[in-house]
């Protein structure tokens, strides 16, 4: 199957990067190379694009797509959590722009054996972004305690039936291990009232999202490394981040705001004495959302939000 991923908010992202032809740019979630190829098109021979992704399929697809740009492009298989170390290893200390598209690719969702989808009954419970990782979604479903399952479904899936879903999973796995997406979906259906299922979208969506986030440490990676990525920017450099659910967006919004105004002095202090200096400006006071045309072309873009920060 061909690796595909509709590059959400593509025009808006490229515009907000303020690309300099001789600049250095990083796509930390390379995917199929959609955003990266548009950046590379705008670079001169002195410019450089570095693409990072942990997914082997993405690395192969992006390598083919970006091959025409030759030495302007460097591709690294890694998690963007390691961006600073990976850049330092190739002699890059600062960059002029960073892009993160935090969505799951269409390829990952539409390839049953990757285990991201709840729509394929026989799909394995995998969900690994990086197949070098040993822990899978199956391990979480079958070995996490009821308390921990409840916590991740409540916190990462924001499902009000989290407690009952966790209870049903534990009861079902005592009879036999939960092996497939279909089996897990049926367990979830049994834990949610029918009247809610009739109006609340697919009942398994939130639980599958929660398991994926837990497995790949998505929120942890974002929250722990966003400050570091801002520090990698040259003055005037920008970081553009596309999120797809409220938890990611909240983290980005909060960290951007803190980097713009890090002062911790009490509000009634006449002058700042904490000494913490602003690192830059939040360009997007409100997130940039997909337009009507994009929403019609790609239904998966409906929850996308783009936020931008510029380094001082």
Image (cartoon, rainbow, N blue to C red):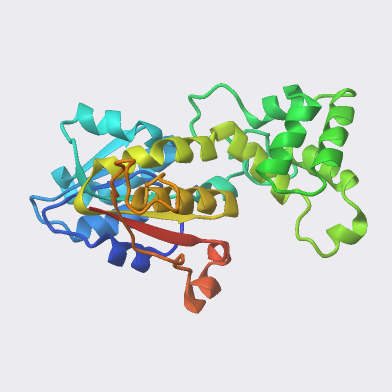
The residue shown at (87%, 35%) is: 168
Depicted 122 relative to depicted 139: above or below:
below
The residue shown at (68%, 34%) is: 125
Note whether residue 310 is visible. yes
Q: Position of residue 300 (x, y in %)?
A: 56, 61
Q: Position of residue 267 (x, y in %)?
A: 45, 53
Note whether residue 32 is visible. no
**Among the 4 quarters of the image, the one containing residue 9:** bottom left
**Count the marks: how many?**
0
Q: Nearer the viewer, residue 19 or 189?
A: 19
Q: Nearer the viewer, residue 135 or 230?
A: 230
Q: Classify residue 238 as left or right of residue 191.
A: left
Q: Position of residue 184 (x, y in %)?
A: 78, 38
**Among the 4 quarters of the image, the one containing residue 201:** bottom right
Q: Position of residue 80 (x, y in %)?
A: 38, 37
Depicted 180 relative to depicted 307: above or below:
above
């Amino acid at each position: 199957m061909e690796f595909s991923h509709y590059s959400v908010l593509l025009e808006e992202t490229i515009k907000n990067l303020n690309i300099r032809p001789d600049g250095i740019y990083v796509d930390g979630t390379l995917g199929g190379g959609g955003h990266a190829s548009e950046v590379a098109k705008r670079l001169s021979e002195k410019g450089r694009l570095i693409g990072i992704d942990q997914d082997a399929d993405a690395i192969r697809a992006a390598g083919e797509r970006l091959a025409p740009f030759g030495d302007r492009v460097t591709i690294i298989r890694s998690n963007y959590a390691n961006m600073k170390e990976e850049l330092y290893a190739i002699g890059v200390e600062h960059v002029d722009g960073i892009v993160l598209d935090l969505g799951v690719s269409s390829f990952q969702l539409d390839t049953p054996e990757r285990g991201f989808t709840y729509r394929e009954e026989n799909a394995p419970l995998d969900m690994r972004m990086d197949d070098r990782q040993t822990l899978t979604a199956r391990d979480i479903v079958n070995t996490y305690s009821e308390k921990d399952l409840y916590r991740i479904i409540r916190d990462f899936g924001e499902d009000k039936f989290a407690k009952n879903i966790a209870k049903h999973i534990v009861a079902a796995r005592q009879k036999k291990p939960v092996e497939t997406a279909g089996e897990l979906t049926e367990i979830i259906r049994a834990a949610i009232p029918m009247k809610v299922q009739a109006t609340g979208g697919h009942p398994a969506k939130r639980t599958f999202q929660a398991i994926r986030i837990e497995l790949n440490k998505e929120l942890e990676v974002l929250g722990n490394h966003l400050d570091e990525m801002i520090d990698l920017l040259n003055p005037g450099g920008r970081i553009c981040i596309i999120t797809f659910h409220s938890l990611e967006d909240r983290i980005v919004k909060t960290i951007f705001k803190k980097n713009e105004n890090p002062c911790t002095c009490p509000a009634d202090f006449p002058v700042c004495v904490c000494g913490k200096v602003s690192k830059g400006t939040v360009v997007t006071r409100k997130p940039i959302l997909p337009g009507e045309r994009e929403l019609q072309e790609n239904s998966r873009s409906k929850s996308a939000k783009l936020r931008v920060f510029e380094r001082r």
